Image (tube, grey):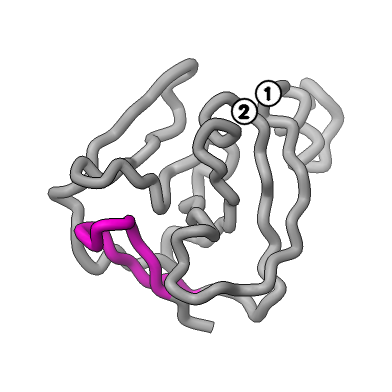
Amino acid sequence: MKACGGCHCGAVRWEARLPEPPLKALSCNCSMCRMTGYLHVFVPHGDFLLLRGSDALTTYRFGTGAAAHLFCRFCGVKSYYQPRSHPEAWSLNARCLDEEVALDVTDFDGANWEAAKSALDGKPEGG
């Protein structure tokens, strides 16, 4: 299915090819996601198209600097970003989709990222 979304003010707009609902989503408790209420829906880079707003985006990096948190510089909304957990995909904020979509939400312990990431990969920690 094709879905569209973007930031609050409309400066950033995108479309993505997503699987049929319910969409698998992650609710993360890391400091960033907990504070912003971000719900992750991952989409391969090839299934995402930024329609407008590259000039409206500003980037914030913290910790390891691997994740590129992209915020609209006008309204402050992070509608998508490059997560460190899925370097081959964008993370879309399910709350920034134009249409409400059924979600299958799983909790992700991003506050303990290293252990949680290994569980996400299905590999033993350190593997």
* The N terminus sits in image quarter: bottom right
Q: Is residue 108 left or right of residue 88?
A: right
Residue annotated with mark 2:
30
CB under 8 Å between callouts 2 and 1? yes
Q: Which mark is residue 111?
A: 1
Image coords of residue 64 (percent x, y) = 48, 18
**From the image, which quarter does the C terminus lie in?**
top right
Q: Is residue 12 magenta?
A: yes
Q: Which residue: 34% across, 61% down?
A: 6
Q: Residue at x 46, y 67 (%)?
A: 97
Label 2 sits on a secondary structure element that is loop
Q: Residues within 10 Å of mark 2 (few under 14, many from 20)?
A: some
The image shows residue 120 at horizontal and vertical percentages of 76, 41
Magenta span: 4-17
Determine the residue located farthest toward the left in the rendered image.
Answer: 55
Question: How many labels, in total?
Answer: 2
Looking at the rendered structure, the secondary structure element under dot 1 is helix
- Which residue type does callout 1 highlight? Ala
Q: Is residue 92 left or right of residue 19?
A: left
